[in-house]
Structures are given as structure tokens and as C-alpha cells.
Image (cartoon, helix red, strand yellow):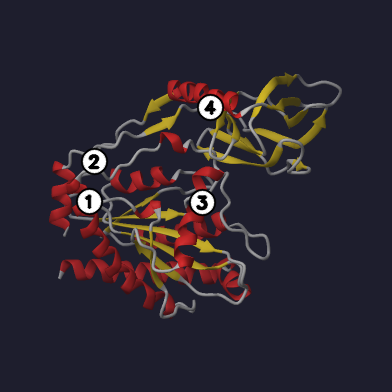
Amino acid sequence: MLLFVDYIRRFSIVFLCLFAVGSFPSQAFAAAAEVQAVRLGLHKNKTRFVMEIDKKPDFRIFYLANPNRIVIDMQEVTWSSAVTGRRSMGVIENYRYGLFRQGTSRVVLDVKSPVKIIKKVILPPSEGKPYRFFIDIAKTDQRSFLKSVKESRKQQVAALSPVAPIAPIITVDRKWTVIVDAGHGGIDPGAIGRSGVHEKSLTLKVALKLRNLLKSNPRYRVIMTRDRDAFLSLRERVNVGRKYKGDLFISLHADSIGRADISGSTVYTLSENASDDEAEALAKSHDKSDVIAGVDLEEQDDTVQDILIDLAQRETMNFSVKFAKLLLPEISNSGMKTGSRSHRFAGFRVLKAPDVPSVLVELGYLSNAHDEKILKSTNGQKKLATSIYKAINKYFDKLQQ
């Protein structure tokens, strides 16, 4: 299989163009701006979104459709002390904020109808108040809104800059490259537990513990899709696996559903036909991460078109299943419940690298008190990371036999 994948990598006519949104001017050697307050205001025929910030904001605003959203990007800021009020008012249905990528923070406004921005203002500090940045939003018709979306896309494309190519790492001894993907992050919190804990923070803690175990073993090169509270789109996560020529891609998550009695870990591998309705619903919910973070889905294109790549993906899926079968017994030994239906199939976008065996691990249910307790504890996180590490060892041992 590995020789087949190497063949695919050498001769595939499909090449990915990786782009990153142009970042804001470097804030090195200076403390990040601090957002002190975020609030909404309702005025005649308009809704106002206001931010109070201790440094002048450098912002870009664009519109997105399906669903309709307004996105505000600015230099990286901190939100820890921000005072917030109501999340829904006037034409604004909800808003969220967080780190989008290094150097860029993002605010996403979900709007109830087609809208237009009629005013953008930055007020300088005065009377003990910091900088105040606000936009006034009013209703418009869908045709005008879509025109604004189109103009926004042109501005975004103009701001794109190519990611510098990464030189291949050459080693004397063959090392297995393991990609560890901590689900969600930054502006996308993922599931929220019974106690209010965010999925994004738990997956990162387990991922970092797994990274440390892998780094202690000279047979591995470990790559993290993220090692901090930052957002990556689903496509970017897949591209990390391909760019670094991963031998195994492991995406870590923690689910939350409406039933508190459901518990345990589940391992998912790729299939266009979901194994059950729950698996299909979960895949759809995970695939909404890009919508939550304000990613322009209209600019996404299919990367699996060539028949050669399609064949590679089928072969890769078989190896993904082999790893899943090794992983479940190890998780069970860690103290987290698994069952007869703990290996499932679904069309998760993050698993679609055609030449990287990939699994998505739902570590447990944050909606279940027992699972949440394990996931929040340092000991529980360590046991889960160790179980994944042991499965990785067994997987590569079998490949070398």
C-alpha cells in the first residue's frame, strides 16, 4: 500500500494550491490589543454592533451567503476580559468571536435576513473610554446582499497570498509521519459540555499529550494541525496531512447529544454511505465548522476528481479501517467505554485526504457526566492519549512485518 501511495504522490496530476488569507501587520514585540466590551444596540431601522478595544482596530469586513453572515477580521486580539451582553437583537441572530489564524482574530455575525452595512466608525479614546468600533446594519433585499457577497469575494481574493512551500525533511532512517488533529479551535468551540467546558480545549489537551508520547519515540515524526487555540478550516486540516505526506492522520473530537445516558468512544472512518443516521448527522454537524468560523464555502472546490486519486482513496480507506480496529481495544483498556457499534462510517470531510489513512476519534460524550469527568481530568486525558499511542505502535509494527 505504501508503495502504491508513493506512486500516487509522484505521478498524480492533481495538485493542491494552498492559500492563506493575508494576515494583518505583525504585532511582534507588542502586546495584543484587548477587547474590553462587545454589545448590540437597537436603533430606528438599524442594529448596531459595538466593540470597545484598547488599541485602534485594523479591520476588514466581508459578507457571506448560505447562510447569510457578516465577517469582521482584525489584528490578533485577546477576549478574556471582554464584557458581553445579549447575543441576539434586531437583524443579528447571534455572534461569536475568537482566533481565526495566527495574527488574525475574527467576529462572525449571523443575520436573520439579507442586510447591508450603512456605517463603519472608529471613535478615538475619550472620557475614559477606549477605542470604540461599531457598524450599523440594516435590512436589504437578497439581490443586493448577493452583490455585496460577490464584491467581498473579489476583495478577499485580492488579499490572498500564497503559503511558502515547505522544504521536504530528509532523514537517514525512515520515520513514520503522524498527523495529530485537535478538532475545532479558535472561533469554533465545538461541542459544549454539561459543565460549560469546550470541546476545542479538551481535544487540544489530549492531542498535546499524544504529541509528547510520539516525540519521545525516534521512529515518529509528529505534526500538529494546531498546537494552540486557533481555527483551521476542514480543507486546511486535510492539506496539512497531504503537505507533510502523513502516514496516518488522527482527528480528535468529543461529541455532545441530547441524551445524557449515551457514553463511550467511537472511531469513524471514511465512507460516502454512513453506517447509520447518527453517524451521518454527526458528520454533517462537524462539517459545519467552516460555516461557524465564517469560511467562504463557495470558494471550495473538489480535490478528488482524478480516477487515480479515487483509487488511492479506496486503498487508503482500507488501511484506515485496520487502524480503527487496533485502536478500539486500546481505548477500552484505558477505561473509556466502547461497544459493538464503536466503529462507524461516515463522509467526514476531514478524512478525505486520498493518500493518508485517516480516522476521526470521538473520545467521549460531553453530554454524559461520566465521560465529561474523564475528558476533563488530566489522568483521563493521559490514558486516552496513551491508548492512541499504543494503537499507533501496533499499526506500524504490522506494516513492517
Query: What's the distance in space between the residues labelled 3 and 1, CA to CA?
Result: 27 Å
The reply to whether callout 2 and callout 1 are in contact (CB within 8 Å) is no
Q: Is residue 269 left or right of residue 38?
A: left
Residue sitting at x 24%, y 37%: 15
The kind of residue on which mark 3 rests is: His
Q: Within 10 Å of the Cα at label 1, are there few (<14), some (14-19), or many (20+) other Cα atoms?
A: some
Q: Name the residue under label 4.
A: 149
Q: Mark 2 points at which residue?
A: 168
Q: Within 10 Å of the Cα at label 3, are there few (<14), some (14-19), or many (20+) other Cα atoms?
A: many
The kind of residue on which mark 4 rests is: Val
The kind of residue on which mark 2 rests is: Pro
The spot of residue 42 in percent (x, y) is 81, 32
Which of the numbered marks, if any, corresponds to residue 310? 1
Residue sitting at x 45%, y 61%: 280
For label 2, the SS is loop
Query: What's the distance in space between the residues labelled 1 and 4, CA to CA?
Result: 33 Å
Instruction: Farthest residue to the right: give it.
Output: 127
Which of the numbered marks, if any, corresponds to residue 225? none
Relative to 135, does residue 336 appear above or below in the rendering?
Answer: below
Q: Within 10 Å of the Cα at label 4, are there few (<14), some (14-19), or many (20+) other Cα atoms?
A: many
Q: Name the residue under label 3.
A: 184
For label 1, the SS is helix
The reply to whether callout 3 and callout 1 are in contact (CB within 8 Å) is no
Mark 1 / mark 4, whichever is N-terminal? 4
Look at the image and tell me in which quarter the C terminus lies.
bottom left
Instruction: Tell me where residue 75 sits by quadrant.
Output: top right
For label 4, the SS is helix
The spot of residue 65 in percent (x, y) is 54, 35
Please name which of the two marks, 3 or 4, marks the residue nearer to the observer: 4
Mark 2 / mark 3, whichever is N-terminal? 2
Q: In this view, does 45 lie to the left or right of 315?
A: right
